[in-house]
Image: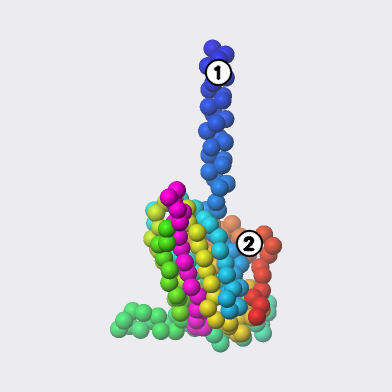
Amino acid sequence: MSILRTLARAMALFLFLCNYATADSLPREPVFLPFAACQKAAILAFDFEAIEDNSYVFLLTLQWSENDTAQREHLAKFMGDGGYDPKTNKQINTGLPIPLRLKISRLDPAGEISIYDKEIMEEELQSRGPKELEKVIDRIKLSTGNYRVHVEALTGIPELVGTPIGLGIYVHRPSVDLRPWRWQFPSQRWVFPNGWVKCTS
């Protein structure tokens, strides 16, 4: 009996360690990282794990202090209002474009497989609030697995110098907003380990 109990404990410990290692191997959705999108040739590269087959939203978020009236008024000139053309149902006022190149590779045992490589010259305006602006880069269908993301800013944007910018990935759920930072951090949606980093020229 003692041998069986010992084996059972050993198996439980083995399963726990396997799960622990898997959980900590790569960051999972939602992923959010600072990105100097206003600086030409700035690069952000990272790996992450997609834990479900779904459409993933890749977006940029620009943030400013709610009390910084000058910065808010400065950015208001470039934000756009997200208006749509009723004939084409496409946005016609997306604000200041942030050109970038997005590359995504799937990390398989056989090697790295490119699944997406595109230059994005204009992003869709998703939301505009009192402290931030969200612009959608693209919505991309991913299956469960590990991925490598590489983002490069294609042009310098002096209008955004001094503005904290972040890049995020989350599962697209059109019927309900389940992004954890919506309810975990009511005063600041994205919290980076070293705080928000202002974009520099």
- How packed is label 2: few (under 14 Cα within 10 Å), some, or many (20 or more)? some
Q: Is residue 184 magenta?
A: no
Residue to which mark 2 is pinned: 191
Residue 63 location, x and y as percent? 61, 73
Q: Quadrant of residue 131?
A: bottom right
Q: Main secondary structure of the magenta part?
A: strand
Q: Nearer the viewer, residue 73 or 2?
A: 2
Task: Depth check: give the residue in front, 141 or 187.
Answer: 141
Mark 1 or mark 2: which is in front?
1
Label 1 is placed on what type of residue? Answer: Arg
To which quarter of the image does residue 91 belong? bottom left
Residue at horizontal 52 percent and vertical 33 percent from the top: 15
Give the CA separation, mark 1 to mark 2: 44 Å
Q: Which residues are magenta?
A: 95-112
Q: Position of residue 67 (x, y in %)?
A: 68, 77
**Residue 111 shows in this picture:** yes
- For disc 1, the marked residue is 5
Query: Circle 1 sits in a helix, a strand or a loop, which is it?
Result: helix
Q: Residue at x 52, y 55 (%)?
A: 48
Q: Residue at x 48, y 69 (%)?
A: 102
